[in-house]
Amino acid sequence: MGSFWSQPIRVECTDKAQLITCRTINSALWFVNNRKLEYMLLAYLAKYAEKYGVLLYAFTVVGNHYHMVARFPHGQRSQFFRDFNARVAESVRHCVPNYLGGPLFERRFTPQVLALDTDVENYFYYCALQAVSSGLCKKTSDYSDYNSFQDAANDRVRVFKLFSYGNTMPQSATTTMSISKTSKQSINLSSNDYQAMKNVHESNTKQCYYKSSNNVD
């Protein structure tokens, strides 16, 4: 009788970006229209990306799951998601009154290696258009929950404050998150590319996952 693994084998890949998906149990919509929860998720994302040296290319939250495109050059993917998803679950318990407790996610994170640079680019836009392709809105600017595309398009650096608990009193710690620099470096897009793609998203969103060739420098 053969042996079977209870979980898929997860091999660390330090030189390639990955598409990561985490979905809630029964696809429950815990991530909807909650600004306090959104702030905490992004703050912890920034904190642990900084701690583990994660390169963030894209991040979007869509009701019952999130997508992340990232690279883990120090081979600490499991540690990152152990800490980040634990804080996400803790934040949901704190910010969502009707959440009754128990496990939040249906399984561990699901990784997909993006072997080519064009794969990183394609899934950057896949995340950007996730809410539109799912029928949640007609334009990216109409989407009320977080999508990193606008941060990348506008070179926005977000600053967060979190409390760190040491041996004495809790102290406020500041952490920052910048998706735009990582995205532009890895995808090799110019500001004109971002603006052109942003215009495409605003005018016609459901069909276009990739920028057209005439937008390439």
Image (cartoon, helix red, strand yellow):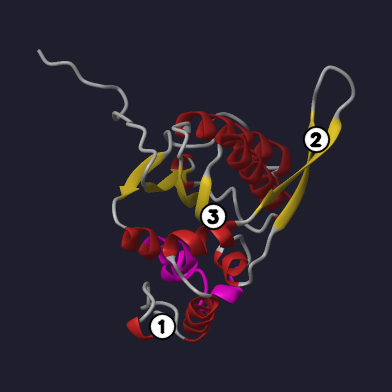
- Residue occupying image coordinates x 33% and y 46%: 112
Query: Which is more toward the observer, 116 or 112?
Result: 116
Residue at the far left: name it: 1
What residue is shown at x 29% (from left), y 28% (from top)?
Answer: 9
Q: Viewer-proximal residue, 181 or 40? A: 181
Most prominent secondary structure in the magenta stretch?
A: helix
Residue placed farthest to the top in the image? Answer: 1
SS for dot 3 = loop
Q: Quadrant of the C terminus?
A: bottom left
Amino acid residing under circle 2: Phe
Residue 128 picture location, percent across and down: 48, 66
Q: Which residue is mark 3?
A: 63
In this rendering, does residue 129 appear at all? Answer: yes
Residue 176 drawn at (x, y percent): 70, 50
Residue type at numbered disc 3: Gly
Residue 12 falls left or right of residue 170:
left
| In magenta segment, residue 199 | no
Looking at marks 2 and 3 on the same chain, the residue that comes earlier in the sequence is marked by 3
Measure the C-alpha gap from mark 2 to mark 1: 43 Å
Q: Residue drawn 21% across and 20% down?
A: 4
x then y, percent, for residue 210: 36, 73
Q: Which residue is mark 2?
A: 163
Q: Amino acid at mark 1?
A: Asn
- Image vertical order of residue 2 relative to residue 102, above or below: above
Q: Where the N terminus falls, by quadrant?
A: top left
Sequence-earlier tag: 1 or 3: 3
Q: Looking at the picture, does residue 37 appear above or below residue 148?
A: above
Q: Which residues are magenta?
A: 123-143
Residue drawn at x 54%, y 73% as measured from the top left: 140
* Residue 44 shown left or right of residue 52 in the figure: right
Res. 147 visible in picture = no
Can you identify the residue that label 1 sits on?
215
